[in-house]
Image (cartoon, helix red, strand yellow):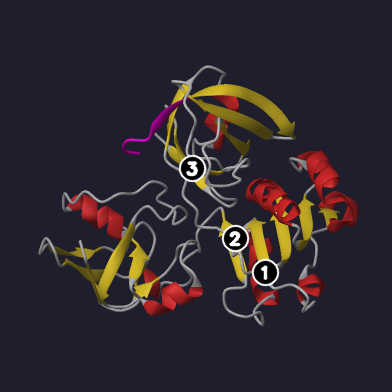
Amino acid sequence: MNGGTEVVVSAVRPLARDVLAIELSHRGGAALPGAAPGAHIDLALPNGLTRQYSLVNAQGAERQPNYLVAVGRDAHSRGGSSWIHDQLRTGQALRVSAPRNLFAMDPAHRRVLLVAGGIGVTPIVAMARHCAAQGLDWELLACARSASRLAYLDELKALAGPRLRTHFDDEQGGPIDAAPLLADAHWDGLYACGPAPMLDALARASAHWPAGSVRMERFKASDVEGGDERRGFALRLSRSGLQTTVAPNESVLDALERLGVEHPFACREGLCGTCEAPLLEGEALHLDSVLSPEERAAQRRMLVCVSRCAGDRLVLDI
C-alpha cells in the first residue's frame, strides 16, 4: 500500500472465540477521517501483506478518534489474520488507508433487513447502529457456527431487542434457510455479509427483488468455473500503447506488472476495488465482489486483479 496514515495499535482484546478487536489511533494523536457504515480500511502489516477490514465504528463523515476493526482467525490464512492473532501487540505502528465504502447503505431504504454470518457481523454492527439511530424499520439475522463465535452478540441483543434473530449451527443442527425471510415483501433493502455459501443462498432467494435492493459484501471473490475462462487473451493499453498476451495462469494485474506498468492495487482478490480500470473495448469476465450487476453489464470498468476476458481481446484506458 502506497502512502496511508501511520497509526498505533491502542488496544487489542478478545471479542469471541478466535475473534480479536483491534483499536487503531493516529500516531500523532489527531482525529482520523470518518466513514459511513459499510466502509473498510486497508491495513498494511509488517509482514508485507495488506488486508481489508470493515470499520465497526463507522458512523458518518465526522472525524473520529480511532478506528475499530474485528479480525477473525482464518484457518486458511495466508498470513493476514494469523499474523494479527499471533504477532500483533499494543503499541505497534501500522499504516492504514483512508476509508473506502463499497458496501454503503442506500438512504432510500427505509425497511431494512440485515444478515450477518460469522465475522461478517463487523460491517453489519455499524449498520444496525445506524438503523436504530435513524428510526428505520429494521431486523437483523445473525448467524454463526456457535454463540461463542459471534462477535458483538451482547451489544446486538441490547441494541436490537426483538428485532434480532440468531441462528447457531451447533444448536440448530446446520445452517439456516433464509429463503422464508426474503419471501416477505415488506423489506425494501437487504444488506448481507458473511461466508460465500450463505451469500450465494441469499442471492438465489432474493433474485426476485428489484435491482439495487440487495447489497452484499464478500470475503472472497467469485471462483472461476470450468476451463474456458482460464484461456489466454490479448491485452492492449490505449494510453501507453503497450500490448501483450495475458497467459492463462496470470491475471491482468500480473501482466501489467510484467510490462513495468505501475497500477494501484491492494488485495489481489477482487475485494477492495483499488485496481479498478476503465474498459474501452472487449467484454470482461467479472470475477470480483465489488461491481454491482448493473456495473458489470455496462462493461465500462473491471478489476484487473481477478477479472479476465470473456472473449479474445481487452483494451484498457491505461
As rendered, which of 298 and 46 lies closer to the eye?
A: 298
Q: Which residue is mark 3?
A: 41
**Other residues around mark 3 within 10 Å, as few (<14) / some (14–19) / many (≥20):** many
Contact? badges 3 and 1 (CB < 8 Å)? no
Q: Residue at 53%, 55% (x, y): give it.
A: 220
Q: Which residue is mark 2?
A: 105
Instruction: Give the residues in magenta.
Output: 1-7
Q: Position of residue 30 (x, y in %)?
A: 47, 26
Q: Quadrant of the N terminus?
A: top left
As rendered, which of 37 and 121 lies closer to the eye?
A: 37
Q: Which residue is mark 1?
A: 189
**Other residues around mark 2 within 10 Å, as few (<14) / some (14–19) / many (≥20):** many
As measured in the structure, the alpha-carbon distance from the residue carrying label 2 to the one carrying label 3 is: 17 Å
Query: Mark 2 or mark 1, which has the lower sequence index?
Result: 2
As measured in the structure, the alpha-carbon distance from the residue carrying label 3 to the one carrying label 1 is: 24 Å
Contact? badges 2 and 1 (CB < 8 Å)? yes
